[in-house]
Image (cartoon, grey):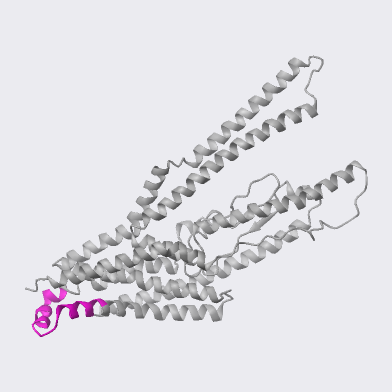
Amino acid sequence: MEASHQLILLGSALVLLSLLIGAFDYSQAKKQYDISTTQMQETARQQVTYQALGIWGLYKVYRPPAPLLAFAKGVEQSSGTNTTVSIVQEPKLQDSLHSVEPIYAQFSTLDFNFVVRVIVALFALMLTFDLVNGEREAGTLKLVLSNPVPRTQYILAKLSGSLVSLQLPLLLPILIGTLVIALGAEMPWHGSDWLRIALVVALSVLYLGIFVALGVLMSCLVRRPSNALLLLVLVWLSFVWVLPRISLFVATRATDLPALYEVERQKWEIDRQWYRDSVASQQDWLANHREFSDVPVDVQSQILSGLQVEAKKKKARIDEQYAARAQRRNQLVVWLARISPAAAFENAMLVLTSTQLERQDQFLAEVKQYRGSFQRFVGEKINAEQREQIDNVAPAPQRGLDLAGLPQFTAPQANLAHDLGHIVPDIAVLLAYLLCACLAGFWAFLSYEVA
């Protein structure tokens, strides 16, 4: 009993610690976002020409951190925090925390999702692996059942008692941590965010209930407690680590997704072919115009621009095909990984906290739409600058650029109704696991041999 109390206290401390660490990480990420956004606006205003702003790749937009980062980090630290917006460059995420500070990739910080999904789930198995077979070995089970106590009542009491004894110490640190974060930190939590937090807690209770039921089931199926614990650890390893990683391998092979180096090699071959074609085209032009010793600059520019447009189209098709395959791979991974309740729980957690991979895709999609209005604004300013140079009109002296009409980027906001639709399959998987484990444990105990 003392060991179980220690496990419960340790689990409670880890839950509270993970929330406090997550709140600190969000605070740091929010400060970095605010400072970077302000500095970017000042840097843009200090440029001398609009061409430098629109073509040289000096203008960036930043992705704000997820408000519920304290509960799950997801891909927040491994994906880029910003992207360059320019006329000539396609937006891509860059400057992730793991690329800027590689030490975070080696020693990832604790978050609530990891603590519940991995550590507390293991504690649940360690608290329930000997509930039935342990009492049989001690002789107390035979003594209890010798009284007029129905087996159904006994096993239901075991299931409900184990679940309550584990969940109450979990809910208390969640309540304390959430209140401390809400009162002590500048968290932009609104009505929908509090609803998301309530759903996160409910999913945690549901998920841990599965491991409680599995522990009771294995305690009924295996006579020796030590063997039951060993089998439960194997099940835990399969659910938490093995099955999600196997699903990634299977999905990658099934969608025939090429490696990134292969994609870059194909685009490199296109650039090489563009160079060969440009040389051949200029030689053909000289062969047809023998009065010229060199290709005129305007003709050379026309030849090169035409070939460059075609090369860009080919590389864009390669990127589109890779993005489509990667999206199919990611969707297949999510569906295959749902075989594991741990993967289903994590997927639902990341969706509810807006730290899933789809949020990064939504950010990039919004940047691509914003890029059109940015191009129109900068393009008009560049044309005006060029007209002034042609007309030899001296521009009015000014300090920096006038960005009064520059469109402002607005990051996409998470929609709770949309996210709920995405986690319905995950909730169904968790409910199915809990129901099957409870029913299997119930029927296993009804036929359990006490002697």
- Depth order, front residue of 123/209: 209
Q: Assign the magenta stretch its main secondary structure.
A: helix
- Depth order, front residue of 146/118: 146
Residue 138 % position (x, y) = 12, 77
- On the picture, is 114 further left or further right than 295? left
| Image quarter hosting the C terminus | bottom left
The residue shown at (47%, 41%) is 259
Q: Which residues are magenta?
A: 134-159
415, above or below 280, in the image: below
322, above or below 355, in the image: above
Q: Taking the image as drawn, is residue 109 in sight? A: no
- On the picture, is 96 further left or further right than 168? right
416, above or below 285, in the image: below
Q: Taking the image as drawn, is residue 407 in sight? A: yes
The residue shown at (81%, 52%) is 48
Residue 29 falls in image quadrant: bottom right
Residue 98 % position (x, y) = 52, 56
Residue 370 % position (x, y) = 67, 55
391, above or below 26, in the image: above
Residue 187: within the magenta?
A: no
- On the picture, is 122 further left or further right than 274? left
Residue 144: within the magenta?
A: yes
